[in-house]
Image (spheres, helix red, strand yellow):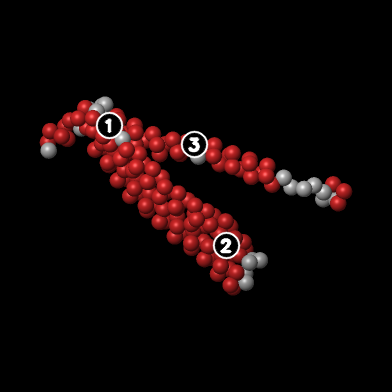
Amino acid sequence: IPEGEDVLPESDKCVAISTRSSVREMIAPGLYAILAPLFVGFMVGPRCLMGMLCGSIGSGCMVAIMMSNAGGAWDNGKKLCEKLNIKKTAQGKACIVGDTVGDPFKDTSGPALNILMKLMAILSLVFADYFWSINEGRGLFNVAVAVSRRV
């Protein structure tokens, strides 16, 4: 850029655009985490909700552990490239790309799943009494009748 045409960056606007976009992108997953336990608890009942929570906690834990470990591995790969002084090679460039993906995996995505699991469990616990009061715990669809008669 020629010196006469040099301008100051407007970093505040860039941060505002990124923040607005990221908040807009998180509306759907947040609503899913809130509405899924409520829908299952009211419609099918607390027994089905318990199964859904067990599945979401089990799979969420596995994914969170995988993300934390993979992010740490990518971060350590970049450190190894720096130690071996191969940053300018194709392998070094691949390590930088891996570090770009690894840092969010390790620092944000894995721990965020913990918050998601807690939100679903606490929401289910708060509404548990209401779920049990609908058709004696069978939900609006009255699905658990066959199961409860066998027990």
> Which numbered disc flags the more N-terminal residue, 2 or 3?
3
> Which numbered disc flags the more N-terminal residue, 1 or 3?
3
Q: Horizontal and vertical percent for residue 80?
A: 55, 69
Marking on residue 130: 1
On the question of residue 138 being in view, the answer is no
Name the residue tied to disc 2. Answer: 95
Pointer 1 and pointer 3: residues touching (CB < 8 Å)? no
Q: CA distance from mark 2 to mark 1?
A: 52 Å
Label 2 SS: helix
Residue at coordinates 44% horizontally, 35% vertically from top-left? 31
Q: Is residue 143 left or right of residue 11?
A: left
> Which numbered disc flags the more N-terminal residue, 2 or 1?
2
Of badges 2 and 3, the one in the foreground is 3
Q: Is residue 44 above or below residue 18?
A: above
Instruction: Name the kind of residue labelled 2 in the image.
Output: Cys
Label 3 SS: helix
Residue at coordinates 27% horizontally, 41% vertically from top-left? 50
Q: Horizontal and vertical percent for residue 135?
A: 21, 27
Label 1 SS: helix
Instruction: Name the kind of residue labelled 3 in the image.
Output: Ile
Residue at coordinates 63% horizontally, 66% vertically from top-left? 87
Q: Is residue 84 above or below residue 118?
A: below
Q: Is residue 4 above or below residue 103?
A: above
Nearer to me, 21 or 102 = 21
Name the residue tied to disc 3. Answer: 27
Q: Horizontal and vertical percent for residue 20?
A: 59, 39
Residue at coordinates 42% horizontally, 47% vertically from top-left? 115
Q: CA distance from mark 2 to mark 3?
A: 33 Å
